[in-house]
Image (cartoon, rainbow, N blue to C red):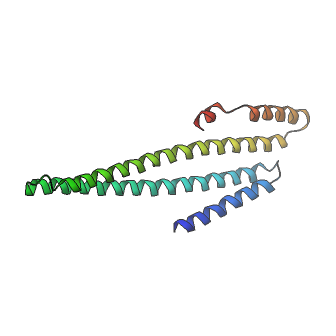
Amino acid sequence: MTEVGDTAKFEGIISDSINRISQAEPGDVQKIAASQLQLLRAYHEIALAQSRRSFFWALLGAGVGLAFFVSAVTYALITGLTAAAVVPLLSGAIVEVVSGIVFYLYGRTTAQLSTFHSRLEILQRYLLANSLCETLEGDERSKARIALIQEISRPQAALVHNS
């Protein structure tokens, strides 16, 4: 599937999941949980596709850079002309630097997606807790809602530092 096709597919899944969550009754734990799982799956697929693309291009760049290095060394050893081997050697070095930058960006993207996934997981827990509150009766429901509100209002220290 093409990248454009992947994007449209994931946008449809995400939009559908968000609509189902917004239309679900607060007490319908199964429907909310199923929509959340579908949403998490879509984000996982997006992250996985992006990681594969980034890793492929970084690996390809590293291979091209290595080929330049090997050709420079081979040329210098066969001909004895080390000055002529400078061009492929420098080309290989430049390609390796670019490849290193792509690997670095791949790592940063993965870290940002991990932070986003953590925030999405917290949201999922709050929605599920709210739905479970709906199944309680009377005073228990009020106490559970108060506890949930206090928990939601508390800053998430681990995520604040990653932002």
Q: Is residue 155 left or right of residue 93?
A: right
Residue at x-position 78% and y-position 35%: 148
Residue 42, image x, y percentages: 61, 56
Q: Residue furthest front?
A: 83
Q: Is residue 24 left or right of residue 49?
A: right
User: Which of the pair 142/15 is nearer the observer?
Assistant: 15
Looking at the rendering, which quadrant does residue 123 occupy?
top right
Q: How many marks?
A: 0
User: Which of the pair 27/49 is nearer the observer?
Assistant: 49
Residue 125, image x, y percentages: 70, 41
Q: Is residue 145 left or right of residue 118?
A: right
Residue 124, image x, y percentages: 70, 45
Q: Is residue 15 left or right of residue 10?
A: right
Looking at the rendering, which quadrant does residue 4 occupy?
bottom right
The quarter of the rendered structure image containing the C terminus is: top right
Residue at x-position 16% and y-position 52%: 73
Residue at x-position 82% and y-position 48%: 26
User: Which of the pair 31/4 is nearer the observer?
Assistant: 4
Residue 27, image x, y percentages: 82, 48
Residue at x-position 67% and y-position 58%: 14
